[in-house]
Image (cartoon, rainbow, N blue to C red):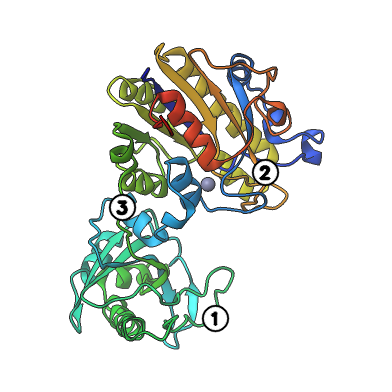
Amino acid sequence: MLQRKVILAIADGVGDRPHPLLNHETPLEFAKTPHLDKLALMGISGMMDLIGSGIPVGTDMGHMILFGYQPHHYPGRGPIEALGIGMEVQEGDVVLRCNFATVDDNGIVVDRRAGRIRQGTDEIADAINGLELQGVKVYVKPATEHRAVLILRGAGLSENISDSDPKAPNDGCPYQEVQPLDDSEESKRTASILNNLLSKFHAILSDHPVNAKRVEQGKLPANFLLTRGAGKLARLEPVTDELNIKGSCIAGESTVLGVARLAGFKAITDSSMTGNIDTNIELKAKLAIEEIAHSDMVLVHFKAPDLKGHDNEPLEKAKAIEQFDKMVGLIAQGLPDNTYLALAADHSTPCEVGEHTGDPVPVLIYGPSVRRDRNWRYNEIDCAYGGLGHLTGNEFVRTLYGLMGRVKKLGN
Ligand SMILES: [Zn+2]
């Protein structure tokens, strides 16, 4: 079987809707994207629903699909974040996403992000890392800024528990007592232990020197851990094993790196990959070309379009897309002959909504002996006329695997 390779460039949340500030074009239509359009001219395009028509997905779920998993494989955000920041997750662990937060003596959440704390979170996490309660051991590691991951390790724990985080915009409300979400003893016990731990964390962190100093400086202390997204890591076969391929992923965002590790891909990042419009596109493109020399599949992630969609900034989103276009142009320049260059997104984030929606996203495949269609622009309107038609995320990924020569024949 002829085997080839794929570089998949993902523009996070790039899908959008026509906007009055952009002459009623979408940001992708409005932006100047000579490289994306050249690939459209030479390649085949289409529209993709990550799971199904109208279903919005998170960045974690969207990437699970783009890395080749099915929606029911989703392990919850906690385990993905833990893998993303390089924590070891064992079978049976309950993993939660957390915010370092500020609460007052009555448990009222003063600030869900502890004044967007950036420094001192290592020391604060150290103060509660390794605690044990009723046979459960605690592991805490800070992520970016006010974020952190908490792992509860011990026998008989359940991930079926509620969040203590009252979520935005509920500053000024009390934090929520963690509740079991089913009648099992495991869920009741896990909720009870976590509630006790949260009080213990509060007592320890209230007296912590980093927080004493913050209060002195007029800053909010990080004296609480708000938890959400409890999950257990399912036993998933890495996609790389299933396909017998080597994969690499280049990204600045821990969520994407977490899914990459789950899928068996080598996770590559750098402090200059900011997750914003100023990310180091030259380095990303260079690494993509270097990695494909010894990998079969490389995913390159670009975050900025999603941020601008959430912020309802269509002009900025178009600028972010122009950066993505440059990155893709650099990759196309160095693309080996045996490699496809594909474009996709993990979901739409229309500016007028400011949130993820289920609007389909444009996809494209360019490369050796691909069946060209008559579309010559990469955007939500023109790709609807493309030769790939309208596919689900799983179908799109399988199309790539098929071109790579990695899909087994059915029948004889
Ligand atoms: Zn996303």
Amino acid, disc 2: Glu
Q: Residue 173 bears which disc, if any?
A: 1
- Looking at marks 3 and 2 on the same chain, the residue that comes earlier in the sequence is marked by 3
Q: Name the amino acid type tagged 3.
A: Leu
Pointers 2 and 1 in contact (C-beta within 8 Å): no
Q: Is label 3 in a helix, a strand or a loop? A: helix
Q: What residue is disc 3 on?
A: 83
Report, in whole angstroms, how far the alpha carbon at label 3 lies from the one at label 1: 31 Å
Q: CA distance from mark 2 to mark 1?
A: 30 Å
Name the residue located 59 percent from the left edge and 14 percent from the top edge: 42
In the structure shown, which secondary structural element does the residue marked by tag 1 occupy?
loop
Give the image quarter of residue 231. Answer: bottom left
**Residue pointed to by mark 2:** 313
Quarter in which the N terminus is drawn? top left
**Do residues under tags 3 and 2 come within 8 Å of each other at their CB atoms?**
no
Residue 365, picture quadrant: top right
Q: Is 388 left, or right, of 109 in this rendering?
A: right
| Between 239 and 327, the one nearer to me in the picture | 239
Horizontal side, residue 135 vs residue 161: left or right: left
The amino acid on which the numbered mark 1 sits, given as a three-letter code, is Cys
In percent of width and height, residue 383 lies at 68, 29
Q: Seen in the image, is 388 located left or right of residue 62?
A: right
Residue 22 image offset from top left, x and y in percent: 77, 35
- Of the residues under marks 2 and 1, which one precedes in the sequence? 1
**Percent position of residue 11, x then y:** 54, 36
